[in-house]
């Protein structure tokens, strides 16, 4: 099997002169009883040059909080943006332009209504000469996804370990209603996933921004683009496949709705065991395995749903209906009848969980969107930034099924056409 591995600014409605950014607000009164005046220090520094396009207006506040931010370019046009949750900076809603001068004016207000305003003017870098790391956001806009859908960003080439925290800081996710999560990197830096401790609640809106344009990534590379998308989570569907029984169990809202006989990968081309996610759905596609070590065939298939980058699908296989439920004869795919495959296409969504157990080989990290193939503690270890200690799976009664509703250095893989 050929396995090849493959960012949350809050969705910004920006206009922007009245913003609240957190800061140090300790009350220290002078001997005369009056509170000290508010003050703020800004970055980039005044008159700074060669500032990256990904620059944010950093704020360090004493004796008050930020009450307004105004960022204008050298033609007097105002840029929108909004603060980070922790109040450490104000993030422009779009990347800055090359070789332009910007002025940030920040006002802070103290507890007794006193205000202080500070400005900084800086100039961005000229057009970069460093090559870009190509990023791919696997989260499209205006879609309906399953409850296990991770936000996935892939990188080519992979992001070096020392640069991952800077990249992760520019990957923003906002959920409505709030359901916070964290990012987690594959060990080789080729992909990073975002999910919450529990599966997404149906009806949740998820807004993503991968704000990487002009971001310095390590010493040799730059970020390539600023991408964003907003979609929603649909009904809860999950699929279990048990090699011991050669049966697929389909659950909706935690309740079993159908069992389907399957034929999995034969011993020479076994299916992977683990927790996967439906990545693509095709009413009709062609599997072309010429050039694959165990391939050499070309076949048209109907109702195919990808679950790994290495070429494993759930699909219609009328040629193996006599084996389904009894014998494994596929090249790694889950073969089902034409009738069952058509029914599945009508009930599943990209982002639904598929769990396969009992086969000869485990699912390899990064072979698909494998964010759910490890527990929460292990997933959180993959974050390049601290994860809040209170961010944990729900402690209440376990869901009746793994997919049931509860309660955030290889190239990115091109899809393999293999299947079977």
Image (spheres, rainbow, N blue to C red):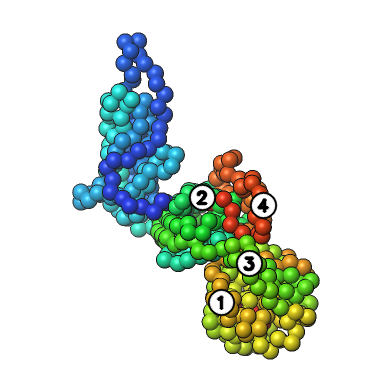
Disc 1: which residue: 345
- Tell me if label 4 and label 2 are in contact, CB under 8 Å: no
Tag in front: 1 or 3 = 3
Q: Which residue is mark 4?
A: 398
- Of the numbered discs 1 and 2, the one sitting upstream in the chain is 2
Q: Which element is circle 4 on? A: loop
Q: Quadrant of residue 361?
A: bottom right
* Residue depicted at 38% across the width and 43% down the height: 83
Q: Are marks 1 and 3 in contact (CB under 8 Å)?
A: no
Instruction: For the residues labelled 3 and 4, say whether their Cβ atoms are less than 8 Å apart.
Output: no
Residue 2: x percent and y percent?
A: 66, 74
Q: Say which residue label 3 marks.
A: 251
Q: Quadrant of the N terminus?
A: bottom right
Q: Where residue 230 appears, x then y in whole percent?
A: 42, 60
| Image quadrant where residue 329 sits | bottom right
Indicate which disc residue 179 carries: 2
* 193 w.r.t. 65: above or below: below
Residue drawn at x 32%, y 40% as measured from the top left: 19
């Amino acid at each position: 099997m050929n396995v090849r591995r493959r960012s949350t600014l809050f969705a910004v409605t920006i206009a922007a002169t009245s913003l609240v950014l957190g800061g140090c607000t300790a009350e220290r009164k002078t001997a005369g009883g009056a509170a000290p005046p508010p003050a703020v220090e800004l970055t980039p520094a005044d008159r700074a040059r060669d500032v990256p396009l990904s620059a944010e207006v950093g704020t360090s506040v004493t004796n008050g909080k930020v009450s307004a931010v105004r960022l204008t370019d050298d033609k007097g046009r105002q840029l929108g943006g909004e603060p980070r949750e922790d109040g450490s900076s104000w993030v422009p809603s779009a990347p800055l332009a090359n070789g332009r001068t910007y002025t940030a004016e920040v006002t802070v207000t103290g507890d007794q209504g006193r205000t202080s305003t500070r400005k900084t003017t800086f100039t961005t870098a000229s057009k970069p000469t460093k090559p870009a790391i190509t990023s791919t956001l696997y989260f499209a806009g205006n879609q309906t996804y399953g409850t296990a859908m991770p936000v996935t960003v892939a990188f080519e080439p992979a992001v070096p370990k020392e640069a991952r925290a800077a990249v992760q800081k520019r990957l923003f996710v906002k959920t409505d209603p709030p359901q916070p999560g964290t990012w987690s990197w594959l060990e080789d830096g080729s992909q990073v996933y975002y999910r919450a401790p529990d599966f997404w609640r149906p009806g949740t809106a998820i807004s993503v921004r991968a704000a990487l344009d002009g971001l310095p990534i390590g010493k040799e590379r730059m970020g390539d683009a600023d991408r964003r998308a907003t979609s929603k989570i649909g009904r809860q569907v999950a699929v279990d496949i048990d090699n011991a029984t050669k049966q697929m169990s389909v659950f909706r809202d935690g309740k079993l709705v159908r069992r389907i006989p399957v034929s999995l990968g034969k011993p020479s081309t076994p299916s992977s065991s683990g927790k996967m996610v439906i990545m693509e759905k095709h009413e009709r596609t062609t599997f072309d395995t010429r050039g694959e070590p165990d391939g050499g065939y070309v076949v048209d298939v109907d109702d195919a749903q990808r679950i790994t980058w290495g070429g494993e699908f759930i699909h219609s296989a009328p040629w193996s209906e006599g084996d389904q439920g009894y014998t494994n004869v596929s090249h790694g795919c889950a073969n089902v009848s034409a009738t069952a495959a058509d029914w599945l296409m009508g009930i599943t969504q990209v982002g639904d969980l598929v769990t396969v157990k009992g086969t000869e080989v485990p699912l390899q990290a990064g072979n698909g969107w494998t964010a759910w193939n490890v527990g929460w503690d292990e997933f959180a270890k993959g974050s390049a930034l601290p994860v809040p200690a209170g961010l944990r799976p729900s402690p209440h009664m376990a869901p009746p099924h793994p997919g049931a509703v509860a309660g955030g250095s290889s190239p990115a893989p091109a899809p393999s056409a293999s299947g079977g």
